[in-house]
Amino acid sequence: MASATVESVVPLTRRTRSGERLRRPARIEQEIASVITRPVSYLRARALATPENKDPLSSECLVYLIRQDLRRGSRRLAEDLTPILLHRCEASLRGSIRGFSPTTAREVREDVLGKLALSLLDQGDEADFLEVRFGLALKRLRIDTCRRYRRHDQRHIQLEDTGPSDGDELPAIDRLRPDRARQEDRLLIRQALASLAAPERDVLVLHRLAGIPLRTQAKARPDLVGLLGCSERTLRNRLRRAELRLQAFRETPE
Amino acid sequence: MSQKNSSPALQDAFQDLLANGDPLDATILEATIHRYPQFTTELTEFAVEWVLQDQLPEGNSLEGNSLERETPEDSHLADTSAVPAALDRFRQQLDARDAASARRHAPPNPFESLSPAELLDVAATVGLDKILLAKLRDRRIVADTLPASLSQDLASALQVPAAVINAHLAAPASVPAGLSFKSTGHPEAGSKESFTDAVQRSSLDDEAKAGLLTRE
């Protein structure tokens, strides 16, 4: 009796902290199942967003197809689909790597794309999450890469000052809005932040931009004393040094 | 700048932080640091970077007023796609994977254990010169083009079954031995040629060449 070969979607093996296996969303599973046996030419055409193909394959689906092709020891499909996936990611990264010079932003972009491409080759299950929530995984990779560049070279930071202090009698930087940007202020603050040590910058950003209080009596609400493991006095000193640095840059004539 | 990825456990910690609250939530940050106390510094840095990336204005609005003075060439570079470079790395890794796989699955090389003197003895026994024998050793001759009688003579000289000779030649060509120590560039496996071409290019005299080419 002749039987048709049915290729099933290979389940993920990576487990969460609680021990559960990662699972693709149902719509991704269905999408993969619907194309899994199609020829390379069809998959390539479905991957590209064109006027004729308004519903291109999801990035999660592309990652599945690429990884499966590589696991089989093949590379034809992977070599066809990986450039499409990377171009898609680059379009997303172009507007979302912020606070770096254009040249460094491109280096960050290349780094992110390179890491992403190499993760597809991983034979284990470290890249499984790319098949679950690709956008979130890419964001993680982007922020982590920016974090590393920032740590290695703080000269690239770009921030803007937008107005009066918020009551601490210190310059406020907590209302960052492009429409209120004054280029000279932004350059000054960027220069100031570039000279800040990481502990000072961390307090400044988490307190002024993220709005996390230095210390709070409310037990349910976290504060920077708890998060950073420093005394309130240390945090205030760091914050003051950071803001004085901003003030000094503001008052120094070019 | 290092191209290395953070450890999987650290990536998990970042993933937890991102997945549980967007934009950054101080309670989630605290809970994540509590779950991954070994990554307190990295999680704090990540949170700072997340806030900066979310709140800084889009694009490079300070272009031309940058601390790093950018030349027109820099600006052009910044606009170019980063995909080709990423793809180059991807393909290099793929090539390395395939080469490693080919090495793992390659049949044993019957010439491998022979000293240079023993190789010369084998060459003299079967009527080849050093160049031809080196090409056979490095699998640079197409297996199907080798006369069966010569394959049998080689097998006898090397004291292995003829099938081992055929399997050896059927595998992908390898980097010639010793080349990796002499070349300034990355050594590449040579392409294969037919036995006839190899004989024509050998240093054998015309009579020896004719003798080899008439073998079946």
Image (cartoon, coloured by chain):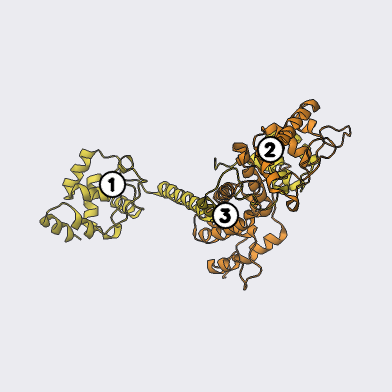
Chain colours: A orange, B yellow
* A246 left or right of B7 in image: right
Q: Nearer the viewer, mark 3 or mark 1?
A: 3
Kindly identify which residue carries mark 1.
Answer: B160
Given the current orientation, which residue lies at the most extreme left position? Answer: B207
> Could you say whether the residue bearing mark 3 is in a helix, strand or loop?
helix
Q: Nearer the viewer, mark 1 or mark 2?
A: 2
Q: Is residue B95 in sight in this rendering?
A: yes
Q: Where residue A76 appears, x then y in whole percent?
A: 49, 60
Kindly identify which residue carries mark 2.
Answer: B45
Q: Is residue A12 in sight in this rendering?
A: no
Chain letter of mark 2 equals B
Q: Earlier in the sequence, mark 1 or mark 2?
A: 2
Total count of labels: 3
- What's the distance in space between the residues labelled 2 and 3, CA to CA? 31 Å
> Could you say whether the residue bearing mark 1 is in a helix, strand or loop?
loop
Kindly identify which residue carries mark 3.
Answer: A67
Q: Is residue A109 above or below residue A49?
A: above
Quadrant housing the N terminus of chain B: top right
